Amino acid sequence: MKIAVASNGEVVTGHFGHCEVFHIYHTENQKIIKSEKVPNPGHKPGFLPNYLNELGVNVIISGGMGGGAIDIFNEKNIEVIIGAQGTAVEAAQSYLAGDLKSTGSVCHEHQHHDTCGE
């Protein structure tokens, strides 16, 4: 399984589309066996969910995300976990342990004036 964590540096980003990088963790038997960083190729509506699908991602973790992206991930059968905080690796490990659940932190405005999580 591949888990992508939208991040700024090593920390989970507050909004998926504006992250600096995606930490992608390759996992087997609930353990991370390989990790890589993929730069965000740019925020265009609908692009990133399809891009991550092409990379073979099964789970996306972020602090917040817009409803349009969530819908596309759902269509691609990619699990969406939003409301995450902390470092990317800790978020991935928490997910693998079954301790990280989505809070439903949907961003409702594209400008994101502190609306993520409301």
Image (cartoon, grey):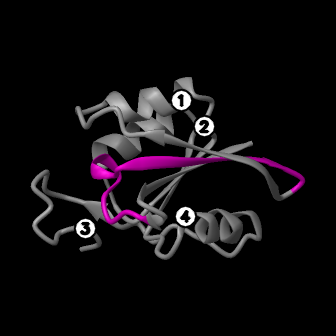
Q: Quadrant of the N terminus?
A: top right
Which residue is identified by label 1? 53
41 falls in the magenta region: no
Q: Quadrant of the C terminus?
A: bottom left
On residue 57, the disc is: 2
Q: Is 64 in front, or is 23?
A: 23
Q: Is residue 12 above or below residue 69?
A: below
Q: For the residues carrying marks 2 and 4, which lies nearer the camera in this image?
A: 4
Q: For the residues carrying marks 2 and 3, which lies nearer the camera in this image?
A: 2
Which residue type does callout 4 highlight?
Answer: Ala
Q: Is 40 in front, or is 3?
A: 40
Which residue is identified by label 3? 116
Start and end of the magenta stretch?
Answer: 12-29
Kindly check if marks 3 and 1 are in contact, taking CB atoms under 8 A apart as contact.
Answer: no
Q: Along the polypeptide, which appears first: circle 2 or circle 3?
A: 2
Kindly check if marks 2 and 4 are in contact, taking CB atoms under 8 A apart as contact.
Answer: no
Residue 30 position within the rendered picture, expressed as x and y whole percent measured from the top left: 83, 58
Kindly check if marks 1 and 2 are in contact, taking CB atoms under 8 A apart as contact.
Answer: yes
Q: Is 84 in front, or is 90?
A: 90
3D distance between C-alphas at marks 1 and 2: 5 Å
Identify which residue is drawn at 46% across, 74% down: 85
